[in-house]
Image (cartoon, rainbow, N blue to C red):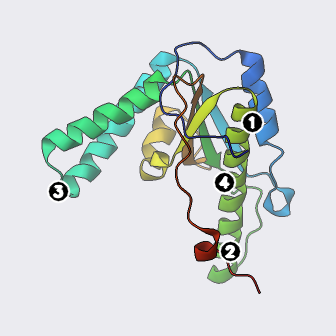
Amino acid sequence: MRTRRSIRRFKPDPVPDSVIQNILTTATYAPSAHHRQPWRFVVSTNLSVKEQLADAMAQDFERDLTRDGLPPEKIQAQIKRSKERITSAPVAFLLCLDMNEMDSYPDGKRSKAEYMMAVQSVAAAGLQLLLAAHAEGLGGVWACWPLFAQETIQKTLKLSESWEPQGIFFVGYAKDIPEARERKRMESTTLFR
């Protein structure tokens, strides 16, 4: 588990369907609140679908970066990089949250907690997906960009409104494997009582 890295550049080799199925199956073994399994996956190996998604998300990205006051050349560079990341990965796994089977409450406090439990469950499935890809000899990286373009993604991929995009995972055979990045010291992140 400590050898997993965030891989951003991939060989063009396709990932076999059987490997994709194994990764998805393993991801569904993540723990979830009330065992409701609120995760939903959209898998794309189709370049034209990934290009449509990249183009649609780029519009939202450009709008947001313009509002942030970034210079046009930096905006275009970031858009180009994000499009390349989406289209160059052999497989893109869009991870969504569906609240339909979660509990509902009349008060805001418990409703917020229920939503957070569902988000945590989906995040656990995302980590499980990355570890499953690593176990299959693949590399992958988790990107949270879908949180900034949920409606655009739903429309582009013709998803149900109940499928809330949470993250996208780019997976394939790694071109290179980076060195491990430094981790914070345990003493700065952990209390022992």
| Measured Cα–Cα span from mark 1 to mark 2 | 28 Å
**First-in-chain label (1 vs 4):** 4
Q: Secondary structure at mark 1?
A: helix
Question: Label 4 near label 2: C-beta < 8 Å?
Answer: no
- How many residues crowd around disc 1 within 10 Å: few (fewer than 14), some, or many (20 or more)? many
Closer to the chain start, of discs 4 and 3, is 3
Callout 4, which amino acid? Ala
Q: From the image, tell me which residue sits under label 3.
A: 69
Q: Is residue 89 rendered to the left or right of residue 35?
A: left
Three-letter code for the amino acid on which mark 1 is drawn: Ala
**Do we see residue 142 in this rendering?**
yes
Name the image quarter holding residue 75: top left
Q: Residue at x 65, y 17 (%)?
A: 15
- Asked where in the image residue 103 lies, by quadrant, the reply is bottom right
User: Are dots 1 and 3 in contact, CB under 8 Å?
Assistant: no
The tag earlier along the polypeptide, 1 or 2, is 2
Quickly name the residue at label 4. 123
**Distance between the alpha carbons at the discs numbered 2 and 3:** 35 Å
Which of label 1 and label 3 is nearer to you?
1
Q: Is residue 125 above or below residue 111?
A: above
Question: Which mark lies nearer to you, 2 or 4?
Answer: 4
Q: Residue at x 85, y 63 (%)?
A: 34
Q: Nearer the viewer, mark 1 or mark 2?
A: 1
- Can you identify the residue that label 2 sits on? 113
Please determine whether, in this image, residue 59 is positioned above or below residue 32. above
Query: Which numbered dot is residue 132?
Result: 1
Q: CA distance from mark 1 to mark 3?
A: 39 Å
Give the CA distance from mark 4 to mark 3.
31 Å
